[in-house]
Structure formats: C-alpha cells, structure tokens
C-alpha cells in the first residue's frame, strides 16, 4: 500500500489487477506449451505452471522488458521469460476421496508442527 486515502487504495488495486492479468496471460501461453511437452513425455499427471515462481520471475524481468529499446533483445527476453516459466511445472493431483479422521493426540497445539 502506498497510502491510506481512497484514491491511493484504488490506484494500488487497479495496478495489481493489471500486473496479475499480464502474468496470467504469460502463464496461459507457457502452460499450453508445457502441457504439449508433458504429453510427449507421457507423464502420469497433467502439469501446470507454478504461479508463485511465475510471479517472481515476472517481477524480476518486467522493468527490464519495459526499458529495453532494442526490439530484438526485448523479444528474446520475453521468450526467455516464458521458457523459464515453462521449466517450473507442478503436477495436478487429485485429493484422496476418504475424509480425514480426527486424531485425539493432535488435540493440543504443542503437538502440531508450525507452518511458515
């Protein structure tokens, strides 16, 4: 957040929406190519792009892409960004159909591992 005034909050909201739409377009393009490669490899599960890593890659390269003046270099950087996204795939797995059973020894918080 850059400020508390309503105009700043609205500006931040629209800026984040724009950036996430740009990232989602890149993910969609990279996901199609990654799915084709996975189909050729005959993997057990379908694959998709890891969104957290894709957002991080985009965040690092976005400014460099915008200020690059050479169109050929910009095109190469864009292709490299989508290729980096394609390398970070995760399988789509279905969850277990059986419901989880509550165990009495997990009743107290000190018995659970903390998550970070």
Image: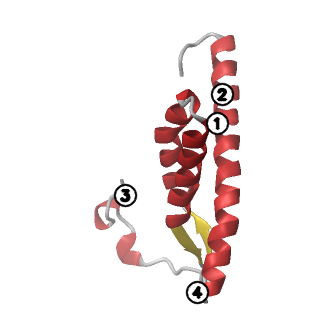
As measured in the structure, the alpha-carbon distance from the residue carrying label 1 to the one carrying label 3 is 29 Å
Q: Nearer the viewer, residue 94 or 89?
A: 89
Q: Nearer the viewer, mark 2 or mark 4?
A: 4
Q: Are marks 1 and 3 in contact (CB under 8 Å)?
A: no
Image quadrant occupied by the N terminus: top right
Between 82 and 18, the one lying in front of the other is 82
Which label number is shown at residue 15? 2
State the CA–CA distance, disc 2 to disc 4.
Answer: 39 Å
Q: Give the residue at mark 1.
A: 19
- Mark 1 near mark 2, Cβ–Cβ under 8 Å? yes
Residue 31, placed above or below residue 77:
below
Q: Mark 1 against mark 3, which lies toward the viewer?
A: 1
* Mark toward the viewer: 4 or 1: 4
Q: Quadrant of residue 99?
A: bottom right
- CB under 8 Å between discs 4 and 3: no
Q: Tell me, yes or no, if residue 38 can be seen here.
A: yes
Q: Which residue is painted at 62% across and 37% down in the image?
A: 71
Against 14, is 77 above or below?
below
Residue at horizontal 66 percent and vertical 74 percent from the top? 35
Does 80 sit above or below residue 96? above
User: Residue 30, located in which quarter of the rendered image?
Assistant: bottom right
Q: Residue at x 55, y 36 (%)?
A: 65
The residue to which callout 3 is attached is 115
Pointer 3 local density, CA inside 10 Å: few below 14, some 14–19, many at least 20: few
Colour theme: secondary structure
Earlier along the polypeptide chain: callout 2 or callout 3? Answer: 2
Graded by Cα atoms within 10 Å as few (under 14), some (14 to 19) or many (20 or more), the crowding at tag 1 reads some
Q: CA distance from mark 2 to mark 3?
A: 31 Å
> Callout 4: few (<14), some (14-19), or many (20+) C-alpha neighbours within 10 Å?
few
Label 2 SS: helix
Q: Which disc number belongs to residue 41?
A: 4
Q: What residue sits 54% from the left and 79% below the top?
A: 100
């Amino acid at each position: 957040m850059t400020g508390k005034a309503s105009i700043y909050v609205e500006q931040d909201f629209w800026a984040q929406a724009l950036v996430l739409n740009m990232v989602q377009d890149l993910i969609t393009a990279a996901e199609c190519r990654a799915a084709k490669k996975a189909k050729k490899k005959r993997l057990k599960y379908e694959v998709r792009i890891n969104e957290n890593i894709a957002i991080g890659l985009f965040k690092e390269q976005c400014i460099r892409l915008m200020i690059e003046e050479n169109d050929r270099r910009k095109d190469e950087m864009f292709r490299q960004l989508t290729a980096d996204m394609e390398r970070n795939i995760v399988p789509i797995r279905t969850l277990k159909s059986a419901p989880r059973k509550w165990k009495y020894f997990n009743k107290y918080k000190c018995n659970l591992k903390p998550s970070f």
